[in-house]
Image (cartoon, rainbow, N blue to C red):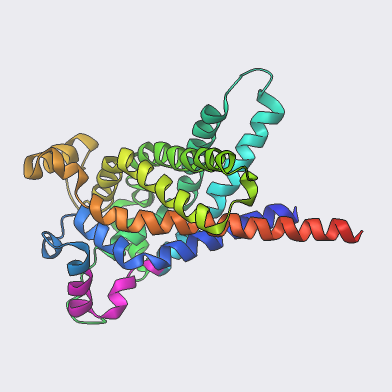
């Protein structure tokens, strides 16, 4: 039981650390994805500088507290359920369905990502609304998470809190699947090449492999995230409800096929450090726990 609680906390802590480190970049990505005019045509550094000059230093982390409230349970659940689903397979399904290492990682990674996303989705929605809220004066007070939920409930009802969830599932399932599979198998491959225990990989290797895994996964699945963000901020009082097809058509008509990858370069700036940090810290904290347990066993 204590190991389960510790693993949940390790996942949550690693998530909060990684997202806080890249919060300004994440806001730039959302502003670009959702076509906020003031920030189109600016590179990531220019957008961060403009954000700072226009809205003040607090704007660099606008929505980050909600993101931390979201990412702590999300990352905890994602890592925990990834391991849990694999244990369930090994205990109950292995004799009926034979899966190789990669196939098992792909399936359990997708299930873990979908489970975590569904649990914290209203927070993800609030984070997007906070990020696209442009203040008229520096350091102006932004609406809170509860206020955003209240507005959504008034205009769209309870279902509005889950607007874009299906698009999130479509995007999150392959992203989480690929991200976790790439990391697990890259770690396995490198550990064999270095003749090291996979569970004893150094912090530097985990940083490198985590960053590479995130970049590979996001490159493949990026358009789904772009569509999800646009679904989330569609006007609450709009008479015509947006669909996946209408959003894709709108993006294509404005920017062509390349429009489906709008904000991808900035996403690399975020994904590389964030996934590197989250995998490295999670593995580091788990290793501390294993060493502690090993020390207790030696004492007794």
Give whichever of 42, 207 is nearer the camera. 207
**Residue 89, quarter of picture:** top right
Residue 165 visible in this rendered orientation of the protein = no
Residue at the far right: name it: 300
Q: Which residue occupies 37% across, 64% down?
A: 22
**Residue 97, quarter of picture:** top right
Give whichever of 283, 193 is nearer the camera. 193
**224 displayed left or right of 51:** right
Residue 222 visible in this rendered orientation of the protein = yes
In the displayed structure, 204 sits above or below 209; it is below
Q: Which residue occupies 30% across, 45% down?
A: 225
**Residue 292 at x, y percent in the picture:** 76, 61
In the displayed structure, 180 sits above or below 37; it is above
User: Is residue 63 one of those drawn in magenta?
Assistant: yes
Instruction: Tell me the magenta residue range.
Output: 48-64
**Residue 82 at x, y percent in the picture:** 57, 42
User: Is residue 35 one of those drawn in magenta?
Assistant: no
Residue at the far top: name it: 96
**79 displayed left or right of 171:** right
In the displayed structure, 73 sits above or below 96; it is below
Give whichever of 96, 216 is nearer the camera. 216
Callout count:
0
**Residue 168 at x, y percent in the picture:** 36, 43
Residue at the far front: name it: 194
Q: Main secondary structure of the magenta part?
A: helix
Q: Which residue occupies 56% across, 50% down?
A: 77
Q: Which residue occupies 46% across, 39% down?
A: 182
Picture quarter with the C terminus: bottom right
């Amino acid at each position: 039981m204590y190991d389960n609680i510790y693993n949940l906390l390790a996942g949550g802590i690693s998530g909060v650390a990684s997202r806080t480190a890249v919060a300004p970049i994440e806001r730039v990505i959302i502003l670009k994805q959702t076509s906020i005019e003031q920030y189109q045509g600016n590179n990531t550094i220019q957008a961060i500088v403009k954000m700072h000059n226009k809205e003040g230093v607090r704007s660099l982390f606008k929505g980050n507290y909600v993101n931390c409230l979201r990412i702590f349970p999300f990352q905890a659940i994602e890592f925990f359920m990834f391991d849990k689903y694999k244990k369930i397979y090994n205990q109950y399904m292995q004799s009926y369905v034979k899966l190789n290492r990669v196939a098992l990682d792909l399936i359990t990674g997708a299930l873990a990502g979908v489970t975590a996303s569904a649990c914290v989705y209203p927070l993800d929605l609030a984070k997007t609304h906070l990020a696209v809220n442009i203040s008229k004066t520096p350091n102006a007070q932004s609406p809170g998470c509860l206020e955003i939920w209240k507005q959504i409930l008034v205009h769209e009802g309870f279902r509005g809190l889950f607007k874009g969830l299906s698009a999130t599932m479509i995007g999150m399932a392959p992203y989480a699947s690929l991200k976790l599979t790439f990391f697990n198998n890259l770690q396995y491959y490198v550990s064999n090449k270095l003749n090291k225990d996979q569970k004893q990989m150094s912090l530097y290797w985990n940083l490198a492999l985590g960053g590479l895994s995130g970049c590979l996964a996001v490159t493949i699945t990026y358009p789904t995230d772009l569509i999800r963000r646009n679904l989330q901020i569609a006007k609450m009082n709009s008479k015509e409800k947006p669909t996946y097809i209408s959003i894709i058509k709108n993006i294509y008509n404005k920017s062509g096929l390349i429009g489906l990858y709008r904000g991808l370069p900035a996403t690399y700036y975020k994904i590389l450090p964030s996934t590197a940090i989250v995998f490295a810290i999670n593995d580091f904290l788990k290793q501390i726990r294993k060493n502690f347990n090993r020390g207790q066993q030696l004492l007794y």
